[in-house]
Image (spheres, grey):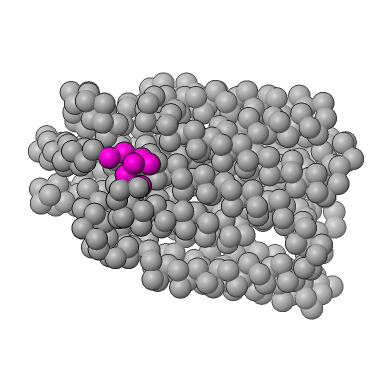
Amino acid sequence: MGTYASSTHTGLHGSARTRVFMTCAMAALAGLLFGLDIGVIAGALPFIAKDFQVSDHLQEWIVSSMMVGAAVGALAAGGLSFWLGRKYSLLLGAALFIVGSLLCASAPNPAFLIGARLVLGVAVGIATFTAPLYLSEIAPGQVRGAMVSAYQLMVTVGILVAFLSDTAFASSGAWRWMLGVVAIPAGIFLLGVLALPNSPRWLMMKNRNDEARKVLNSVRPETAVVEQEMKDIARQLQVKEQGFSLLRKNRDFRRSLALGIGLQVVQQLTGINVVMYYAPRIFGLAGYSGHQAQLWGTVIVGVVNVVATFIAIGLVDRWGRRPILLTGFGVMTVGMGALGWLLHLGVSTHAEQLFAVAMLLIFIAGFAMSAGPMIWILCSEIQPIKGRDFGIAASTFTNWVANTVVGATFLTLLNSLGHAQTFWLYAVLNAAFIAFTFFFVPETRGVPLEKIEENLLAGKPLREIGR
């Protein structure tokens, strides 16, 4: 382990650096499509509701149907990424993005639209499973956090682009164009994935060692690093159990799986997708009654989301995962709590409107700099190689189940608990997540995946497997 561990602190240079960043940038485009599909529904939903005359409850299911499909896609992605490989799973996801977007744009009624968003959701589920996994396996240890964070950055860029697109089409109410335009970047992504190499870890799982060595030689700085990494992967592959059989037989894998599932539940219960799916409705609660003003408010949300993600990219491999998460949950607690308090008192003046927006943006910044990218990074790092596909599939599936619950209950919570109480609920949850992070989340900054696995299987406490 010594040679490889020490090599992770050497810099990439020359053509290796270029190939790493080009490869990771193309894989991270999956995040752009994910972000587009999250953001586009926020602006389109009011026009869909008007055209189809649908209730709040049916609107919740138009929003949430994509998450149901994503849960199915995440489950399927585990097997797909094992049998087809990470690259061809991404290709399948790209094709489904195109088909789903075009079906959404042509929907003649709400039932068809829900079905089309289910198809789109399967694409999202495959992408959200496969892209972070691929990035964690192709990127060198010293930039792994930044490369997986780039995926989350592209999610935020996609959300912002969707908000801008929605605003551009808002004057005509052209919600079909809002939904259908996603097919264009999906086509570009499909062509780009064709040029990606296969994951070297997956190639070695399939006994294609020469191909794995060729890929590693193109994205690592020197031959000695390549040979040591191949030895480390080969040693891991000597463990015979895989997936569910490893879950039954190995207590330590059950621990890492439970942590991955817990992290994904935490990410969704922060309340971030409440804001992303229903941003115009929330700006309405804050006193902005005009639809155009509400859409421009969502654009500001998107801008803050993108800018704050750069904080994560800059700090993740310097400051570490745990400190960023602890800070982010604290910021989100303040933002949601203050917004709830203001709604409780009533928003009547322009200054109060501005303060409400400021608190919402503080919450967005707190998420984008922390739980947004950090959860995906950690879930791609903590699973042992023989259970990685199963573990990440299970945690990603959980993410989408939790996402579905959040998306399908927000309007109901507003109508039953009340506006202020709903935001206070999310503030309390974010405060609880500070304790969760402190007691259970490991620091994995700069630690090779092989070392993390070694510590896990040695029985170290979860918070110490990165040491």
Residue 162 in percent (x, y) is at 65, 40
Quadrant of the image for the C terminus? bottom left
Determine the image quadrant of residue 168. Answer: top right
Residue at coordinates 52% horizontally, 44% vertically from top-left? 397
Query: Does the segment drawn in magenta span residue 413?
Result: no
The magenta segment: 241-247
The residue at the point 21 percent across, 53 percent down is 454
Asked whether 238 or 167 is in front, the reply is 238
Residue at x 76% of width, y 24% of height: 106
Secondary structure mostly seen in magenta is: helix
Q: Is residue 442 left or right of residue 174?
A: left
**58 or 295, nearer to the observer:** 58
Foreground of the two, 229 or 352: 229
Say whether residue 90 is left or right of residue 353: left
Residue 243 is one of the magenta-drawn residues: yes
Across and down, in percent, residue 329 comes to: 51, 68
Where 220 sits versus 100, above or below?
Answer: below
